[in-house]
């Protein structure tokens, strides 16, 4: 049936379908009943077509938080919630999950990836994909393949041998495609073994040929640079559109016989196949989905991923809570619910820790002290302090002006942190993707058709305090900030990666001192020269302005925080990373917490033995004070309901059910693979299959907290590991364990099974994760747990999947280093 539709189209029509129609959408072809398909980031929420605070999205925990549940069924629920949001926003395909691995903890998109382990990543990807697709929305696992870091991300050439690719980096994609049944896959920016991924043979084999992938390979945004090489390689869809390297050039290449028309037909068939799956072909066949969710899942999910790594009888608190709490740390107020970059959504509502604790404990005396400043750059101004000078309503007027100063388009916005991602505003107020053409002066629909060259933002701002402060702007290019028509700041900021990287998502900033008086409004106007952006590109613009938080005397602030801790019953210090530190487009330069947060924790812990540290980071950070505090709770980027979930966990309403999906180092020097910096363009995955905990075990080094670790609120005993005496090559290995909850509370445990080979001809990991299962048990209860170890866990790649006969040891327990039970199985 699809072939018949393909046959109805001429070459131009077919090739047109192979490049996006817009920045986020595919082309429609009404003659065959094909509608445009809208794609959206994600993947911890669904942003929809516009990056716009007037159309917010449910902001779920980021991938590392979700992965900490180790729960495939949970990942499936998570996917279903995303699907509901996608359908509510008219989105056909969610650009995720991101299933690259945590190769180095410095990776800038670590928060957006699940785990350092291929099996855990792949299993969660399967759940995620199934959950999304069950509701007729496509999941698009990305970035295929070996996109583990951000440094030189468009050009880095990953060198990895076949076995490493198969066993480690391709493995999660294989599971997402074969078991999850993913309807589309996104190819990566980077190269692998000399060929950029949109031109790489891996797209055909194993992805399609071996794994039977039937959908389209969508490019990463702007990744495709060639016509023939990419078209011949198995790249199916070039994004974004409407321009790109295919179009007329590809039609010509087909006419000249350099690209067979059958290659084009196959791509079109794959796109039509996807369209049929998501209800964009012919009649709407997709079943109605569940209604858009409320925030309840966000709260549950945030708590489920929190990992308690240390607890000296401090948590949970009794249900009434402590009499008094000193809540310390800027992150308690300016919390990070998600990482930076394309994954960001505008949350529906955001509950920081301080607010969550105050709401949960109305009778507790809560004193807040910032202690150490971590934000770097201007913070958006609160909406209630802003008046749009045109409408008189709360907000900001944004105008795009042409070279004659005429208004090309205008919008009334509700934030001073704005981003037009692949589309400026539509004339008449509402933002839309058509604006991209208008801003570039390509469309006749706006009178003069001249391009916008200036973005002007204005608002009447009512300061809440009196005194000297710093007004700042963050954007690539030239901006001038006026306060009541006087120039307060002239900024000229550059960033080489301004197109879709850090320059857009975490732009450089600058500030200047101003004196403001409480309740005396000033007119703030920011004039930004769009032509000064890298390459003069105006289709994606980010600009944010506001006041910078600066500590005039940080010693005194830390001392004040310690004093607050000394006089309170307990202290909660929230520490974390910032938007600059964990974001797409850049790798981290250090694992240390930014600013003086380590000093702050130490000062507070010295003042109050009952200090709980809450770590708000999407990736591992160093915690040199970890033995000096009563408890440490890792929250990752927990999504919009952070504060409520945190209160639930501290009060024992919810258990911190998470287990580490990645190793947390004590020291940078110990990390087996740290650098993400290509050498002469190449990033050598020289460690081979020894990634993550496997690398730690091989090096014989002890991290702060091992892979799989997490305490929860009860204790456990593992007994009676049962494994068969022998297993057939290519057959599954059933494992059973009896697990007893030896504590006083109902709890949740993740039973982890690892394999090792005492004698082998192959360079194997010391041991490797082979299976896992989530178990719940009441106090005193014993549960028999079945863990199915898949055949693949016993295989290795040597030109094909092979099985080495001989004895495998089977280890079961609660983390990669806490494995009390060992059994033995003979592989035939
Ligand atoms: C990112 C992708 C994302 C795309 C669209 C790219 O820069 O690497 O993950 O889906 O942009 O925003």
Image (cartoon, grey):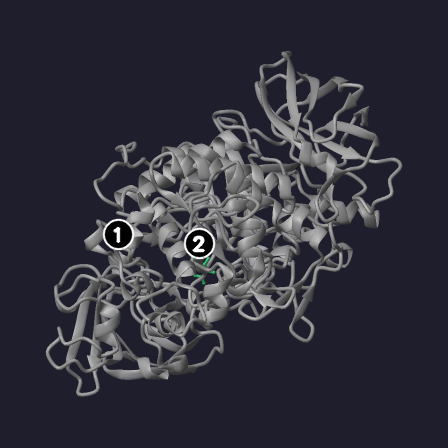
Mark 1 touches mark 2? (CB < 8 Å): no
Residue at x 63%, y 59% (from the top left corner): 106
Query: Which mark is first along the chain, 2 or 1?
Result: 1
Farthest residue, direction right: 759
Placement of 465 over or under 652, stated as above or below: below
Question: What SS does tag 2 mark?
Answer: loop
Q: Is residue 553 left or right of residue 284?
A: right
Instruction: Pinpoint residue 596: horizontal percent, then vertical percent.
Output: 61, 61
Instruction: Pinpoint residue 385: horizontal percent, then vertical percent.
Output: 26, 60
Q: Is residue 437 visible?
A: yes
Residue at x 38%, y 70% (from the top left corner): 250
Quadrant of the drawing holding the C terminus: top right
Q: Which residue was labeled with disc 2? A: 334
Quadrant of the drawing holding the N terminus: top left
Instruction: Pick whichever, 534 or 554, lies toward us.
Output: 534
Instruction: Pick whichever, 503 or 152, lies toward us.
Output: 152
Placement of 1 over or under 511, stated as above or below: above
Q: Which residue was labeled with disc 1? A: 55
Instruction: Pick whichever, 430 or 728, lies toward us.
Output: 728
Query: How far apart are the alpha carbons under marks 1 and 2?
Result: 22 Å
Q: Is residue 614 visible?
A: no
Pointer 2 residue Cβ closer than 8 Å to ligand 1: no
Q: Where ligand 1 lies, by quadrant?
A: bottom left
Instruction: Pick whichever, 390 or 372, lies toward us.
Output: 390
Label 2: how many residues lie within 10 Å, few (<14), some (14-19) or many (20+)?
some
Question: What SS does tag 1 mark?
Answer: loop
Q: Quadrant of residue 391?
A: bottom left
Instruction: Pinpoint residue 665: horizontal percent, then vertical percent.
Output: 71, 50
Query: Which dot, 1 or 2, sits closer to the camera?
Result: 1
Q: Is residue 309 left or right of residue 586?
A: right
Placement of 555 over or under 144, stated as above or below: below
């Amino acid at each position: 049936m699809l072939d018949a539709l393909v046959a109805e189209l001429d070459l131009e029509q077919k090739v047109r379908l192979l490049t996006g129609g817009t920045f986020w959408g595919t082309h429609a072809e009404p003659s065959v009943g094909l509608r445009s398909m809208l794609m959206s980031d994600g993947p911890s929420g669904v942003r929809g077509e516009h990056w716009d605070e007037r159309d917010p999205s449910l902001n779920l925990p980021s991938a590392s938080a979700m992965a900490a549940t180790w729960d495939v069924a949970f990942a499936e629920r998570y996917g279903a919630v995303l699907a509901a949001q996608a359908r509510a926003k008219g989105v056909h395909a969610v650009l995720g999950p991101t299933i690259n691995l945590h190769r180095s903890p410095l990776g800038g998109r670590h928060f957006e990836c699940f785990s350092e382990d291929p099996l855990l990543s792949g299993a969660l990807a399967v759940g995620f994909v199934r959950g999304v697709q069950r509701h007729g929305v496509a999941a698009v696992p990305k970035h295929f393949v070996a996109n583990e870091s951000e440094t030189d991300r468009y050009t880095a050439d990953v060198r990895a041998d076949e076995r490493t690719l198969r066993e480690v980096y391709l493995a999660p994609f294989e599971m997402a495609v074969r078991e999850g049944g993913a309807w589309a896959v996104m190819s990566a920016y980077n190269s692998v073994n000399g060929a950029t991924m949109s031109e790489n043979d891996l797209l055909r084999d194993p992805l399609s040929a071996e794994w039977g992938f039937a959908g389209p390979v969508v490019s990463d945004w702007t990744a495709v640079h060639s016509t023939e090489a990419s078209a011949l390689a198995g790249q199916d869809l070039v994004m974004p559109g409407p321009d790109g390297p295919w179009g007329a050039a590809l039609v010509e290449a087909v006419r000249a016989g350099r690209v067979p028309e059958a290659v084009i037909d196959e791509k079109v068939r794959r796109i039509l196949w996807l369209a049929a799956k998501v209800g964009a072909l012919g009649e709407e066949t997709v079943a109605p989905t569940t209604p858009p969710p409320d925030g309840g899942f966000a709260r549950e999910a945030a708590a489920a991923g929190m990992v308690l790594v240390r607890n000296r009888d401090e948590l949970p608190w009794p249900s009434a809570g402590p009499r008094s709490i000193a809540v310390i740390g800027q992150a308690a107020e300016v919390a990070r619910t998600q990482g930076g970059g394309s994954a960001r959504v505008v949350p529906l509502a955001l509950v920081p820790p301080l607010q969550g604790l105050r709401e949960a404990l109305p009778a507790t005396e809560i004193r807040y002290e910032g202690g150490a400043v971590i934000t770097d750059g201007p913070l958006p101004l609160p909406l209630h302090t802003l008046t749009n000078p045109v409408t008189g309503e709360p907000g900001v007027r944004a105008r795009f002006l042409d070279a004659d100063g005429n208004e090309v388009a205008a919008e009334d916005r509700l934030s001073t942190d704005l981003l037009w991602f692949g589309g400026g505003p539509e004339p008449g107020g509402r933002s839309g993707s058509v604006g991209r053409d208008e801003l570039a002066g390509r469309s006749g629909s706006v009178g003069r058709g001249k391009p916008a060259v200036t973005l002007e933002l204005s608002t009447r701002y009512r300061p809440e305090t009196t005194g000297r402060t710093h007004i700042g702007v963050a954007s690539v290019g030239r901006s001038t900030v006026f306060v009541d028509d006087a120039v307060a700041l002239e900024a000229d900021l550059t960033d080489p990666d301004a197109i879709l990287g850090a320059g857009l998502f975490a732009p450089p900033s600058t500030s200047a001192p101003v004196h403001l008086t409480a309740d005396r409004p000033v007119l703030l106007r920011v004039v930004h020269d769009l032509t000064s952006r890298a390459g003069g590109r105006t289709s994606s613009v980010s600009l944010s302005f506001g006041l910078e938080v600066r500590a005039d005397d940080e010693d005194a602030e830390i001392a004040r925080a310690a004093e607050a801790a000394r006089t309170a019953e307990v202290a909660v210090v929230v520490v974390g990373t910032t938007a600059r530190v964990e974001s797409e487009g850049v790798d981290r330069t250090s694992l240390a917490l930014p600013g003086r947060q380590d000093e702050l924790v130490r000062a507070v812990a010295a003042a109050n033995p009952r200090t709980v540290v809450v770590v708000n980071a999407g990736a591992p950070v160093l915690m040199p004070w970890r033995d000096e505090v009563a408890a440490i709770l890792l929250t990752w980027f927990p999504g919009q309901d952070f504060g409520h979930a945190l209160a639930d966990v501290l009060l024992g309403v919810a258990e911190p059910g998470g287990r580490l999906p990645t190793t947390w180092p004590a020291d940078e020097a110990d990390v087996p693979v740290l650098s993400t910096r290509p050498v002469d363009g190449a990033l050598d995955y020289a460690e081979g299959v020894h990634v993550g905990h496997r690398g730690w075990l091989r090096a014989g080094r002890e991290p702060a907290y091992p892979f799989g670790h997490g305490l929860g609120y009860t204790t456990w005993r593992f007994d009676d590991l049962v494994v068969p005496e022998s297993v057939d090559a290519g057959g599954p290995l059933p494992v059973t364990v009896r697990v007893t909850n030896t504590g006083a509370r109902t709890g949740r445990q993740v039973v982890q099974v690892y394999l090792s080979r005492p004698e082998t001809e192959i360079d194997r990991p010391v041991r490797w994760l082979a299976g896992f299962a989530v178990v719940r048990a009441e106090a005193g209860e014993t549960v028999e747990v079945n863990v199915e170890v898949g055949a693949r866990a016993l295989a290795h790649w040597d030109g094909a999947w092979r099985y080495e006969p001989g004895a495998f040891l089977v280890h079961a327990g609660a983390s990669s280093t806490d494995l009390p039970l060992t059994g033995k199985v003979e592989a035939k």
